[in-house]
């Protein structure tokens, strides 16, 4: 069973309100770097689900280029944020093979800093990654 930090719970609460999420100022170039380093091995360089590690996954890898199309043309920012962060467990989604990037970024972030500053690092990376994922969407 997963113990949620108050920061993780707060992030999940924000993610549930799509109107509360803004990608204004998100660094798409940083998002591309994060994607290339952390996501492309499974999702592939263009997000089609054809990364070199896909054969290692039980369920394969999803094509993430159609997220907006599957959501009536609107990119599902809140859902993607929750999936990427991963610190708020959603029982109905079942087990996840994808890393819990919120924990990964928290560990990578500035150590010895106050929680708010460490969460700022997590937020910056997740928002940048989401901004980049939006550029991969099929029209």
Image (cartoon, rainbow, N blue to C red):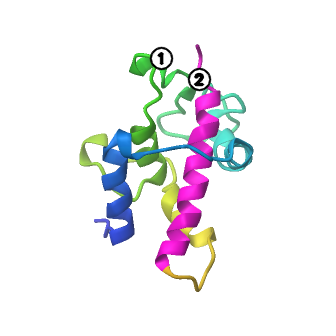
Residue 1 position, x and y percent, is: 28, 65
The answer to whether any part of residue 21 appears in the image is yes
**Label 1–label 2 contact, CB within 8 A:** yes
Q: Is residue 19 above or below residue 46?
A: below
Where 16 sits versus 63, above or below?
Answer: below
Residue 29 locus on image (x, y percent): 74, 44
SS of the residue under disc 2: loop
Residue 95 horizontal/vertical position (percent): 36, 47
Measuring 55% from the left and 61% from the top, which residue is drawn there?
122
Q: Which mark is residue 44?
A: none
Q: Is residue 130 magenta?
A: yes
Sort mark 1 into few (<14), some (14-19) or many (20+) by Cα contacts within 10 Å.
Answer: some
* Image quadrant occupied by the C terminus: top right
For this orientation, the residue located farthest to the top is: 139
The residue wearing badge 1 is 69
Give me the residue at 38% from left, 58% from top.
Answer: 11
Q: Sequence-wise, which precedes: disc 1 or disc 2?
A: 1
Q: Give the main secondary structure of the magenta stretch.
A: helix
Q: Is residue 95 left or right of residue 109?
A: left
Residue placed most toward the observer, 62 or 78: 78
Q: Which residue is mark 2?
A: 137
Give the residue at x 29% y 48%. Answer: 90
Q: Is residue 33 left or right of residue 26?
A: right
Residue 48: quarter of image: top right
The image position of residue 56, as x and y in percent, is 59, 41
Q: Residues within 10 Å of mark 2 (few under 14, many from 20)?
A: some
Magenta residues, start to end = 115-139
Indicate whether residue 84 is drawn in magenta: no
Residue at the image position 47 percent from the left and 34 percent from the top: 59
């Amino acid at each position: 069973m997963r113990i949620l930090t108050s920061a993780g719970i707060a992030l999940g609460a924000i993610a549930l309100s799509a109107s509360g999420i803004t990608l204004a100022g998100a660094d798409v170039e940083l998002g591309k770097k994060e994607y290339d380093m952390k996501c492309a091995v499974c999702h592939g360089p263009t997000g089609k689900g054809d990364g070199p590690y896909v054969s290692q996954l039980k369920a394969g890898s999803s094509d993430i280029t159609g997220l907006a199309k599957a959501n009536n043309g609107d990119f599902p920012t809140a859902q993607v944020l929750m999936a990427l962060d991963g610190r708020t467990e959603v029982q109905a989604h079942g087990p996840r093979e994808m890393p819990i990037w919120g924990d990964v970024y928290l560990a990578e972030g500035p150590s010895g800093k106050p929680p708010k500053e460490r969460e700022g690092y997590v937020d910056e990376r997740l928002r940048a990654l989401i901004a980049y994922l939006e550029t991969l969407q099929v029209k």
